[in-house]
Image: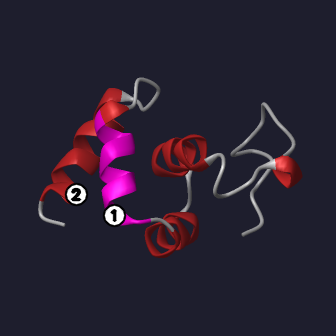
Amino acid sequence: MHFRQTLFWDTDPKTIDAKKNARYIIERVLDLGTDKEVKWLWHFYDKALIKKTVAASRSLRPRTKNLWLLLLKSK
């Protein structure tokens, strides 16, 4: 996946490793990503990892976190 610079403004998107930086990527994409980026995330990462990341996140905006907790509840 090619990451947008605007999504990862604080680092060089070319240096991001999808496996090593999974939590960082999941938080950014769920909070600020496009539909296409969220679809990629959904297919790339294990649902349990996404749930765990959302539940433990301290950087997701409160509304975003609540939305994803509700959406992931049934998954």
Instruction: Indicate the position of residue 67 as horizontal and vertical percent values.
Output: 25, 46
Write down the quadrant of residue 62 in the picture: top left
- The 10 Å Cα crowd at callout 2, few under 14, some 14 to 19, many 20 or more, is some
Between discs 1 and 2, the one toward the N terminus: 1
In the displayed orientation, state which residue is furthest to the left: 74
Q: Residue at x 87, y 42 (%)?
A: 12
Q: Residue at x 28, y 37 (%)?
A: 55
Q: Residue at x 39, y 42 (%)?
A: 53
In the displayed orientation, state which residue is furthest to the top: 58
Mark 1 to mark 2 CA distance (whole Å): 8 Å
Instruction: Indicate the position of residue 60 as horizontal and vertical percent values.
Output: 42, 32
Instruction: Indicate the position of residue 10 as horizontal and vertical percent values.
Output: 78, 31
Q: Is residue 8 above or below residue 33?
A: above
Can you identify the residue that label 2 sits on?
A: 72
- The 10 Å Cα crowd at callout 1, few under 14, some 14 to 19, many 20 or more, is some
Can you identify the residue that label 1 sits on?
A: 47
Q: Looking at the picture, tell me which residue is in the foreground, 35 or 60.
A: 60
Predominant secondary structure, magenta span: helix
**Magenta span covers which residues?**
46-55
Residue kind at label 2, given as amino acid type: Leu
SS category of the residue bearing label 1: helix
Q: Is residue 67 above or below residue 43?
A: above
Quadrant location, the N terminus:
bottom right
Q: Do the residues under discs 1 and 2 have CB atoms within 8 angstroms?
A: yes
Lateral position of residue 49 relative to residue 9, left or right: left
